[in-house]
Amino acid sequence: MLVSNLICRVGTVWAAVIAVCICVPVPCPQDTCMLPNSKDNPRDNQCRDLDVYIKCMKSLSKKCRGDIGYHSAVTVSNSEFKKLCTSHDDFSRNNSSEHSQMAQSTHNGPSCPLLFDDKKEHRFCGLFGDPHLRTFDGKYQTCRIHGAWQVIENPFFGIMVTNEAIVNSTTATAPTKLTVILKAHKPECTLQKMYEAQGDFQLPGVFEDGSTSSGPATSPTVSLSWRSNDPNSETVIIRLSYISTIITVTRVGKYLSISAKLPDQLTQLFNQDKNVLCSTGCPHSEQINIKQVAINELDRALTSCHNSVGPTGHKLTDQYLDWCVFDMMTSHDEQFINASHAAYSDVLFFEPRSLFNRTISIFEYNPNSTAGANGIHGLNLFILTIITLYNFL
């Protein structure tokens, strides 16, 4: 019965994978990995078959790189294996030597060369909220970008994000799923690893293969650490020392954010024929002018964002204050205030010099003007007309 149920679940995943691959010019050949139907001694055989299936799927990692359906199948299989087999003594004993050999091969041998200098210029990119984007070249954009999008892509790793519609909002979307794929680069540096996060669940504290690092224990080339920010927020930090890169994934409520700091040289290594958000920005058709947002409960949004205090005692400034107000007006979800603070904290950590400490939102009344007493009265008829049209789009 266990095997039958498992095959049904894996079959469902395969069906989804096949549907995805129909649209891909070079399909991922994951159908070559078969899961036998074990009838005798179900528990032992099921774990053994799962182990064989997972190894087969991992052997296709290069051919199926970036295929979300493939990675979903691997994630489901690994989850089933951990649930059914990791506590199974006989199977664990039989595989312990193999697993230790794999770990030893990663930690022994020649050291991984550092490919980029920590002291040279780095660039920062972040994505969070409705969503809001800061590109490597310092552009600030608010975008629709519903569905799956590539955030970063280079020869060493890739980051993909999925944005979904926000409940009780007709226009707002937010990141709810995120995948980080570390590409294999020399055995002494790292094997391929994947990290996947979903907003509905706590952030995993390990990579998909159950590990938290690669390389020597004293100076790992890859390391993953998890921390709790508060009962409703947590952050995972992935450090790639061999390419002088830091990636942070934060969950606030059910929404995710991603930040990354890379060497300037590495940010130039992307396929210019593809739309990669951190490198090329959002397509023009997907960009939103936040000054033309429908103004609902502006005073409440301004008060909430101005009065909020981040985990390090900071107040929101610059675009992060504007984005907080924007998100509160479009979603009315106070989780976005915390998301703005999480993103602002990343900027304070990665690139504080990019901030100008502007404390007045673009939605507020200009105190040097005598046109009115608050932000709404300060808007002219043209902007109000645009806002009205925006509501009917």
Image (spheres, helix red, strand yellow):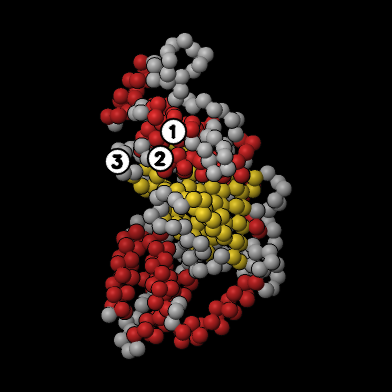
- Label drawn at residue 334: 2
- Label drawn at residue 304: 1
SS class, disc 1: helix
Amino acid carrying label 3: it is: Asn
Question: Which residue is the site of mark 3?
Answer: 168
Pointer 1 with pointer 2, Cβ within 8 A:
yes
How many discs mark residues in the rendered view?
Answer: 3
Instruction: List x then y, in percent, for residue 185.
Output: 60, 64
On the rendered structure, is 215 left or right of 45? right
Image position of 235 with respect to 366: above or below:
below
Please tell me which residue is depicted at 64% across the width and 55% down the height of the picture.
Answer: 243
Amino acid carrying label 2: it is: Glu
SS class, disc 2: loop
Please tell me which residue is depicted at 45% across the width and 77% down the height of the picture.
Answer: 86
Q: Which residue lies furthest to the bottom in this view?
A: 40
What separation in Å lies between label 2 and label 3 (alpha carbons)? 13 Å
Image position of 229 with respect to 217: above or below:
above
